[in-house]
Image (cartoon, helix red, strand yellow):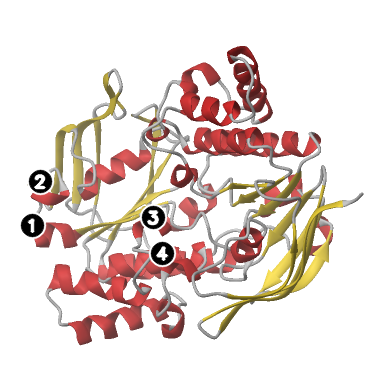
Amino acid sequence: MNPVAELKGLRVEVAGSTLVDGVSLTARAGRITALVGPSGSGKSTTGRALLGEFPAGARIDGRISTPGPGSVGYVPQHPAAVLNPARRAGALLRDIAALRGGTRREIRDRVEHALRLARLPDPETVLRRYPHQLSGGQQQRVVIAQALLLGAEVIVADEPTTGQDPVTKQGIVEALAGVARQGIAVVLLSHDGDVVRRLADDVVVLRAGRVVDRGPADEVLPAPARPVLPGPRAAPRPAAARIAVQEVTARHRTAHGTVAVLHGVTLSVAPGECLAVTGRSGSGKTTLGRCLSGLHSAYDGAVLLDGVPLRRGLRARTRAELAAVQYVFQDPKAAFDEHRPVLDQVGRTAVRLRGADRDTARRAAVRTLGELGLAEDLTLRRPGALSGGELQRAALARALLAAPAVLVCDEVTSGLDAATRDAILAHLAGLRDRDGLSLVFITHDRAAAEALADRTAVLDAGRLVPSR
């Protein structure tokens, strides 16, 4: 089977640091090639090289061969970043389909065919919505359809199942398998060993920018690892709520008015307690976390910190209130300024919210980043030179620099390899146990929730339901 795209001896350097070194990769028509390895191993750098995209200031050696401009499509880990927020999904896809000319009927047929290949349920409803009104899984499949309409012969899928519930994950797996059956080459970048085992024909293992193994998944992938936390934990003592939600009904604006996404939610978290919040994509988990942190103000009801109502929006909250409740985003790349070094942005939190001087803030940032496994020289780079997993740890460090009483973690382990995930869970457990930090842990990862959480709240269509 002839290759569709190839990398030969790819080497990428940024500011004297080698991101990938001598990587070779072949993507073949109708086959799925998975790139696996720990955070920072070079997966994203390698995958994006097929698109001809590199970090600013990068030095590149080696050979990159693709069918031509526009032949490689990209499905990012956070698809909202590549969808136009001002255009409905249907208008966007029809505009792309119209690039090839044809009648309205032919354009509509192309869109419908792409949506079928992308396995998008209820396409008529999805086409009428803006990207922010779609779940992560729906956004992923719209981006897949977009790549197909552009005539992609190769699709690079970067952690496409990260942060998705099992049903949505299965749909994305089926969509990528269907794309490969159409004769398109798929390059899958993933930490999810289960997904790789189900999908990949070939697996390439990266570590520290080098290929260390390749072959069938069952030969080169280790057995799945469950999260492990150090030592048993005593049951937390009953205590007054650190943060509480009382009868919160939250709304999102749509083209036709507003729609409720949370319905009368009431819950609380005590000092030193971890509450896991789970549920399917679109169930309201992130909206709940954003209400707690002041990022979403369109709600009725109340959010209380130590019994005192919090102001609804970020701009209305005092500096002390902002510091007390910190939010770690699922998409860390969107939360960083791409033009400033990561270390400066992490340290800025202590200056802005705690009144620390710059030197003290920098030392605290270096220390906290180091505790999360990020060396100072790495964090002197801009965000584009860090992997998704490294940025996720930097985002966590930035929140911790505020010395919060409550930390809202939105899928913070979903883009991490098993070893890094376990280290982050252990770090959060230590903060909870030693410092009394209250954790709201939003996740689809049931094993991680079981390892860290004291209790679990399950959301379904914006309502709390009994946990199983």
Residue type of the residue flagged with mark 1: Thr
Q: Few, some or many C-alpha atoms within 10 Å of disc 1 (few <14, some 14-19, many ≥20)?
A: few
Measuring 38% from the left and 35% from the top, which residue is drawn there?
132
Query: Which residue is disc 4 drawn over?
Result: 233
Q: Few, some or many C-alpha atoms within 10 Å of disc 3 (few <14, some 14-19, many ≥20)?
A: few
Question: Where is 111 relative to 277, above or below?
Answer: above
Nearest to viewer (mark 1 / mark 4): 1
Which tag, 3 or 2, sits closer to the chain's start?
A: 2
Which tag, 3 or 4, sits closer to the chain's start?
A: 4
Question: How far across and down, in percent of the image, does residue 441 sit?
Answer: 38, 52
Helix or strand or loop: what does disc 3 sit on?
Answer: helix
Q: Judge left or right: residue 386 versus residue 9.
A: left
Question: How far across and down, in percent of the image, does residue 24 sit?
Answer: 78, 68
Helix or strand or loop: what does disc 1 sit on?
Answer: loop
Helix or strand or loop: what does disc 2 sit on?
Answer: loop
Whether pointer 2 and pointer 1 mark residues with C-beta atoms closer than 8 Å, the reply is yes
Compute the Cα span from label 1 to label 4. Answer: 35 Å
Compute the Cα span from label 1 to label 3. Answer: 24 Å
Query: Which residue is disc 2 drawn over?
Result: 311
Q: Judge left or right: residue 21 versus residue 411.
A: right
Measuring 40% from the left and 80% from the top, which residue is drawn there?
380
Query: Which residue is disc 1 drawn over?
Result: 318
Which tag, 1 or 3, sits closer to the chain's start?
A: 1
Query: Which residue is disc 3 drawn over?
Result: 334
Question: Where is 232 relative to 318, above or below?
Answer: below
